[in-house]
Amino acid sequence: MKITEIRPAKGKLFEIILENEQKLWLHADLVQSEFLRSGDDLDEDRIADLRRRAAEHRAYEYGLYLLEKRGYSYRELYDKLIAAPNAQEDAVLAALEKLTRYGFVNDALYAEQLARHYVEGKKYGIRRAEYEMRHRGLAQTDIDEALAAYDDAEKISAQLLELLQKKYARYLTDPDDRKATEKVTAALVRRGYSYQEIRYAIEDYYAWLEEVSGDDT
């Protein structure tokens, strides 16, 4: 099947028009690397290969575009790429393999980044951080390894005490105020902390508050 015309399209794409009015949209790099010219005769296998390589290039470029905005897990990025218009699974998988090989997709590293974001940044407990990370498409092994550094009783206790001091101090003025304690406890449970961790932290908070109050008198 002959190429009747090659003309520039949007961006770096070229529109390849075949004699039966079929059209191919190929990136300039592919047109140049294949030395495509008007009048070239393409068989069905070569046309299919060009379509496959064009689809792979689109998926790869779209993947890079998404990754420039934020990190993605392999699974998360697969879902995005496969949902794109005219996506082909073989092309998406080939693009993901290339992105992974070049280090743009790295689930273990992404898990570490998310763990730091959720635990250190948002001050979530381990359970909430784990929940959020699972929803980013990460494997449990990567999640467990990334969160292991934060699963330490002393670190959790210190983080909770800091949270109470900075965010919930206005509620915790009286250790006998059960309503206030329950309100703060509910908020911290939603952040992913256990009842036991919260109970100990509130006890530590009132001990700290008493110490500070004593210093001021």
Image (spheres, rainbow, N blue to C red):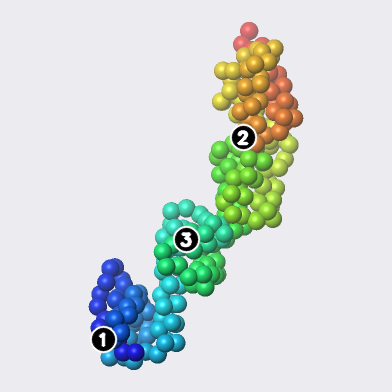
Above or below, comparing residue 142 to residue 62 in the picture: above
Query: Residue 20 in the image: x percent, y percent?
Result: 30, 84
**Number of numbered discs:** 3
The three-letter amino acid code for the residue at tag 1 is Thr
Q: Disc 3 to disc 1, how far (Cα)? A: 32 Å
Q: Are marks 2 and 1 in contact (CB under 8 Å)?
A: no
In the depicted structure, whether residue 124 falls above or below residue 72: above
Residue drawn where x is 24% and y is 78% of the image: 7
Q: Amino acid at mark 2?
A: Arg
Left or right, residue 211 beside residue 5: right
Task: Say if 190 sits above or below 60 in the image.
Answer: above
User: Which residue: 75% across, 30% down?
Assistant: 196
Q: Earlier in the sequence, mark 2 or mark 3?
A: 3
* Callout 3 secondary element: loop
Q: Position of residue 19 (x, y in %)?
A: 29, 86
x and y percent of residue 29 in the render? 36, 77
| Image point (42%, 68%), residue name | 86
* Residue displayed at 57% across by 59% down: 75
Left or right: where 95 falls relative to 4: right
Q: 139 left or right of 10?
A: right
Q: Mark 3 or 1 closer to N-term?
A: 1
Question: Which quadrant of the structure image shows residue 142?
Answer: bottom right
Q: Which mark is residue 4?
A: 1
Q: Quadrant of residue 184?
A: top right
Front residue (pair 162, 62): 62
Which tag is nearer the camera, tag 2 or tag 1?
1
Disc ID at residue 83: 3
Residue 166 or residue 64, whichever sits in front: 64
Callout 3 environment at 10 Å: few (<14), some (14 to 19), or many (20+)?
few
The residue tagged 2 is 191
State whether residue 212 appears in this view. no
